[in-house]
Amino acid sequence: MKRVATFSRGIAGLEHGPALIGCEKVVYRPLSASGIDAVVGWGHKGNTMVAIEFAHKHGLPYWRLEDGFLRSVGLGVEGDTALSMVMDDTGLYYDARRPSRLERILADDPLEDPAVLERADRAIAAIVEHGLSKYNNAPVAPVALRENGGRPRVLVVDQTAGDLSVACGLGKRGAFTEMLAAAHLENPDAEILIKTHPDVLSGKKHGYLGTPQERDRQRLISSPCSPIRLLEQVDKVYVVTSQLGFEALLVGKPVTCFGAPFYSGWGLTEDRRPVDRRGRVLSLSQLFAAAYIHYTRYVDPDSGAPCEIERVIEHLALQRQEFARNQGRIFCFGFIKHFWKQNYVRSYLRCPGNTIEFPYSAAHAEKLGFDANSKIVVWGRRAQDDVGKLSDKYGIQPWCMEDGFLRSVGLGSDMDAPASLVVDQEGIYFDPSTPSELESILQTTNFAEPLLEKARHLRGRLLASGLSKYNVGDTERSLPIEADDKIVVLVPGQVEDDASIQLGCFDIATNLGLLEAARAARPGAYIIFKPHPDVLSGNRCGNIPKEQALVVCDHVEEKASLAQCLRVANEVHVMTSLVGFEALLRGLDVHTYGQPFYSGWGLTTDRHPVSRRTRKLSLDALVAGTYLLYPRYLNRATQRFTSAFSVVDELETARATGAERMDVSWPRRQVRKLRHIASALAATEVRRGS
């Protein structure tokens, strides 16, 4: 379909609407049917009548839309983008009064393709493993149920009054009270848990069961929680039409239906409201494949392009994984002076229900409620006295935050937000004096072949694109060197007061000292010195006057990109620079004069080996640990956690547009900084107002 008409403002403005619908353009309230291929409306809403009449008048197909079964992280009413949708030209999956497209798939399609059923089984396992559901913003903490002396637990699922799936799903008047009575009668020795919506208890909405009282063996579950994690702790489930019934099947629980949801009538549930049309016996894999794979459409969370279910599961699982790490109250130190970082730090530490504070002292933190269950985050190794006091008093290991290895197109000192951060719960990767989380990953991880294959693929992407940490410099510039047959040695400069030099260097800790050591090691080589971009920009210290550098080296390169420099080099000599790691990716010989995170694994020549690092790693294992397992990546457009591969796409696009180039005039860069500051201040005011 090319052009689809709608009379719904919501559908017309739906993000990724054309991709989900499968058309090129959604036309809002067309004046005529010329060029229109179909008409769409939302579910059974009353405002769809205009659209239906338009379709009938002009002989056009009419499709009903509804959210998919794996919709998003947050709620649609909160503005969270839908990642899945169903389209039905016959009925709707929750309307048992007449056949839907899904029902016809379940009744008539063979559903016997082994590859599809295998996909279904893998998807079910992933959904259960990660606790995924239609919405995925519930707290990730385990559901705490009271001790009941080992009695069985039966879950009775209430729904909010007016839910269309109840009336359309043959839920007769009194179905919910009948269901609750049956649960008590049929399970006399069990604890009956009633899952009601939090909005019911708060008075915002009404449930069909009203506000049930806790009595005898009847308990309420009203707090937000992961449906899968709750279902794992019960023995049997009673529903009218709730999707929790299907998710209970995924967990392997017996389900009794007092209505006719899409999953009843196929031999997997006990049905108190049978549907005569449904008589086929299906496996759970077949039912899942029909509903989640054949019937539902998905869009890629990062690109918005059509995709398969596996991509959405991967994305939602990543969000839940990061939420699990970010639970609780997090107190961030070292950000008052650098307040502009607070905005993006909140994004990296986000989790439903958590609290993020930026105190200016230990006393202020305690006034805000800091206690032994709190978490401390500090930028890098800037551990203030306040952090030490709280850490010692409460026995809490601070987490260290730092930029990731694929950061931005532009400099951190120019206030460009990072596409990746590391949050290290053991130390920090640039401090070799103590183990870090990265060092533990590299020392202990079993790097299985699928992970190594992903690392190889990522390394190929990085080499093909020439991306590095900051991605500044001219990618088209050819280096004017005349090395003849000499070995070409690249010496990358660093910011001399950088923590990695202060913590990871010994006898050689300046750019001039590094140049002199490289010349001593390779007296006959052609040496290129590339100053650090933060030093070139004037933001940080470590500058060597060009004339002084040329006494030791053969060429000083200030404009070409790092990738261009690495292309002409045979060896790279570093103190602790990340350039050494990027040189390893390209198969170059690397000599380290300090103790960077990538030294000591058998891949570099090290002046100061780290005795704790006893394992010999392949390059792919080093890449997997460093890029895939250690950092957190953020899609800066969607503000959702993402993968290294998506960040590579984002950085390539940003570099192509030149939006954050460093090679612009100093005044223009200051204006850009002011824009970043204004944006951070605006975001802070919005949070205060809410």
Image (cartoon, rainbow, N blue to C red):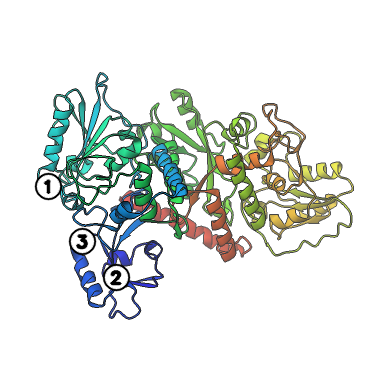
**Circle 1: residue type:** Lys
Mark 1–mark 3 Cα distance, whole angstroms, equals: 20 Å
Q: Which residue is mark 2?
A: 61
Asked if residue 197 is positioned above or below residue 24 in the image, the reply reads above
- Which label number is shown at residue 114? none
Can residue 468 be seen here? The reply is: yes
- Which label number is shown at residue 172? 1
Q: Which residue is mark 3?
A: 45
Task: For mark 2, give the secondary structure.
Answer: loop
Comes first in the chain, label 1 or label 2: 2
Can residue 349 be seen here? The reply is: no
| Mark 3 nearby-residue class (10 Å; few <14, some 14–19, many ≥20) | few
Please report contact status of discs 1 and 2: CB closer than 8 Å, yes or no.
no
In front of the other: 460 or 479 = 460
Mark 2–mark 3 Cα distance, whole angstroms, equals: 18 Å
Mark 1–mark 2 Cα distance, whole angstroms, equals: 32 Å
Q: Residue at x 71, y 52 (%)?
A: 531
| Mark 1 nearby-residue class (10 Å; few <14, some 14–19, many ≥20) | some
**Circle 2: residue type:** Pro
Quarter of the image for the N terminus: give it.
Answer: bottom left
| Mark 2 nearby-residue class (10 Å; few <14, some 14–19, many ≥20) | some
Q: Residue at x 22, y 66 (%)?
A: 48
Please report contact status of discs 2 and 3: CB closer than 8 Å, yes or no.
no
Q: Is residue 378 left or right of residue 226?
A: right
Horizontal and vertical percent position of residue 205:
17, 46
Q: Quadrant of residue 546?
A: bottom right
Comes first in the chain, label 2 or label 3: 3
Horizontal and vertical percent position of residue 568:
78, 55
Q: Is residue 421 left or right of residue 593?
A: left
Q: Is residue 268 left or right of residue 186?
A: right
- Closer to viewer: mark 1 or mark 3: 1
**Circle 3: residue type:** Lys
